[in-house]
Amino acid sequence: MIVETLSLESWRNVQAAEVEFDPGLTLFTGPNAQGKTNLLEAVFLLATGRSHRTSRPEELIAFQRPQAYLRARIQRSSGEYQLTARVEGGRVTRQREGKLFRRGQDPLGDFAAVLFAPEDLLALKGAPADRRRLLDLDVGQASVAYRQAHVRYGQVLRQRNALLRTYERPPKELLATWDAAWAQAAVALTHERHRLIERLAPHFSARSGEIAGGAPASLSYEPSLKASDPTAALSLLAELREDELRRRTSLLGPHRDDLKAEIDGRDLRLYGSQGEQRTVLVAFKLAAVSLLGEGPGGPPVLLLDDVLSELDQDRRRNLLLAATGTQTIVTTTESALAGMQPGMTYAVRDGDYVRTW
Ligand code: ATP
Ligand code: MG
């Protein structure tokens, strides 16, 4: 799939802009704080319904404006269509050819994007939440069942945590209801995560071997909940009852999952060198591209936000080489990046995108 054009209205620091993209590589250059990341964030939101850097949609609307609006033309092998997103009143709504679809329910492979930003490079050694985010945002687009299970679990968890926060001793029946809902949703999401990571892992190993040229890295899932059905999940939960009532929050379930990357049995979360961290993240993003590329829509759009300057020559070359055949949109503060041959280049100034090539 390819995004051909994008128009933005009242989106962050962009008042109104129209941008056309090359089917290969498009480059956006400019100083800090001009609107480079804002543009990639817009493309990513069209794909996922979410921003990669905030969970509060109201931040996306330009100051003093009531709403933000994005409109893109997407080209697929089956033809072209219009995809729009409106941000208003703290909500994001997307439409395909004027027809509404809800988050987590968009047709698989309709329009997908993988975004790679410098802060991702910290995820390997960061908190488990950082590693889960990688999975949820990028890779989650490969499975409708995953996205639905993720949305559902988030809803149940919020309700259950609210209950634990509100009462020192929640009413028994109410707690039992939310325990049961939690068990269903937690088992479902754990199951979907197993499946998704199983699909991603071979791509990840292959890519990491290519990039580093040494022993490939492996990826595995460390679920918080080790139960394969809701009944087993409930009995594990019962063991934590007193702890949960004391700490007034949910202590078990996919919101505490982790991902592990290893080389030769060495846990890279603990022992990864700087270079290994970069290799792992590049491999992870490329693995996401490969996995999503297996879907009916073909390769996703790859969004590289100021990340090439963080990589050495070899990793940069391997990343761009591996992305051949994938529409790629790159931002950078450097005026020229060695080894790149963009089809189109833009200068970014104060929320304006001016074509220079
Ligand atoms: P850098 O190279 O530092 O990453 P950038 O070009 O990627 O810079 P952006 O993150 O795209 O910069 O942000 C550009 C500007 O948008 C920032 O100055 C920011 O303050 C502004 N901005 C963010 N949200 C809004 C908003 N809702 N309304 C108006 N301006 C906003
Ligand atoms: Mg930026």
Image (cartoon, rainbow, N blue to C red):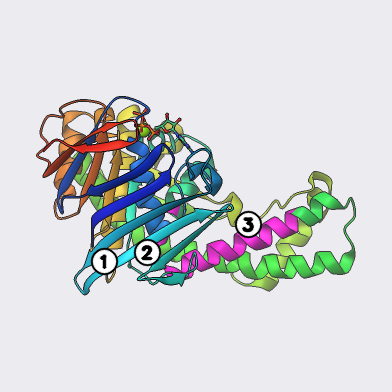
Whether residue 61 can be seen here? yes
Labelled disc at residue 142: 2
According to the picture, the residue beneath numbered tag 3 turns out to be 253
Q: Residue placed at 35% from the left, 63% from the top?
A: 83
* Contact (Cβ within 8 Å) of mark 1 with mark 2: yes
Say whether residue 222 is left or right of residue 28: right
Mark 1, ligand 2, within 8 Å: the answer is: no
Mark 1, residue position = 294
The residue type indicated by label 2 comes to Ala
Magenta segment, prevailing SS (helix, strand or loop): helix
Q: Could you tell me the amino acid type at mark 1?
A: Glu
Helix, strand or loop at mark 1? loop
Left or right: 183 in relation to 310: right
Three-letter residue code for mark 3: Gly
Q: Position of residue 326 (x, y in %)?
A: 19, 54
Judging depth in this view, the residue of 25 and 38 nearest the camera is 38
Tell me the magenta residue range. 137-161
Q: CA distance from mark 2 to mark 3?
A: 22 Å
